[in-house]
Image (spheres, rainbow, N blue to C red):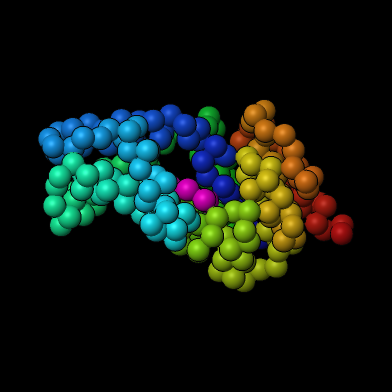
Amino acid sequence: MIKVVAFDLDDTLWDVAPVIRRAEAKLDDWLTANIEALKFTVTSMRDLRKQVIDENPQLINRITEFRRCIIERAIVLSSIDQATATMQSHQAIEVFLQARNQIELFEGAEEVLVGLTRRYTLGALTNGNADIKRLGLGHIFSFAFCAEAVGAPKPAHHLFLAALKHTGIKATEMIYVGDDPRLDIDAARSLGLYTIWMDRGTRSAGEYKANAIVTRVSELPGAIATIEQMSESS
């Protein structure tokens, strides 16, 4: 019996590319307005990525802190003292996160998700830094884990194991829905979870075959029902 349906977020429930573009534009605007001496834009800061990660390799799995440290380094390299740079980088990353969590769900997604909450516990498992509370989706998702919090991104099993421990269920009692065949489908299937591939037509299938494939969120209830029948007969 399926008890939990967990979701990837970015590119599964909304298109993330325009979200990040808007967030970076707002960050650029804030930096320009608040740090006159800054010699970098968000785009040119990317040249600092290797420098920062070489000095702090532990940041590779901490995407929010990694971005903040890049901003801090850019401020320091603009001849601003370290204490001020640290303070301003925290302010800047908050501006980015606020904008990063202003998303537009795919058409019909909220209605479908609310409907699913009447039968299943819903959760979110993401490599990104979207935040359920900031997104205003706390009424839909009962739990949420991000890679930064559990210590490793998909395809590592950390996120899935955190969800299983939190809910107290077996792998065969959970369905995971994601758009990435390797990070989502292969990773979840290798642990024994049922999977639904949200196929946006931009990626090739991975090593494992998803238990169901959909192209729109509106198809999820039917796909979940099919897996329910599959799980009950196995």
Query: 213 or 85: which is nearer to us?
Result: 85
Total numbered circles: 0
Secondary structure mostly taken by the magenta-highlighted segment of the chain: loop
Q: Where is residue 127 in the image (x, y as percent from the top left)?
A: 52, 51
Query: 103 or 94: which is nearer to us?
Result: 94
Residue at coordinates 28% horizontally, 45% vertically from top-left? 71
Chain part drawn in magenta: 126-130
Residue at coordinates 72% horizontally, 61% vertically from top-left? 191
Residue at coordinates 58% horizontally, 49% vertically from top-left? 7
Quadrant housing residue 161: bottom right
Asked if residue 216 is positioned above or below residue 135 in the image, the reply reads above
Quadrant housing residue 164: bottom right
Q: Where is residue 172 in the image (x, y as percent from the top left)?
A: 74, 62
Q: With 7 as the anchor, is 195 left or right in this view?
A: right
Please check the rendered image and state whether residue 228 is part of the magenta-colored stretch, yes or no. no
Tell me, yes or no, if residue 79 can be seen here.
yes
* Image quarter of the N terminus: bottom right
Asked if residue 9 is positioned above or below residue 122 in the image, the reply reads above
- The outermost residue toward the right is 233
* Image quarter of the C terminus: bottom right
Residue at coordinates 74% horizontally, 42% vertically from top-left? 206
Query: 234 or 72: which is nearer to us?
Result: 72
Q: Where is residue 78 in the image (x, y as percent from the top left)?
A: 18, 41
Q: Position of residue 60 (x, y in %)?
A: 47, 54
Tell me, yes or no, if residue 123 can be seen here.
no
Q: With 37 as the anchor, is 138 left or right in this view?
A: right
Q: With 78 as the anchor, is 173 left or right in this view?
A: right
Quadrant housing residue 38: top left
Asked if residue 218 is positioned above or below residue 61 in the image, the reply reads above
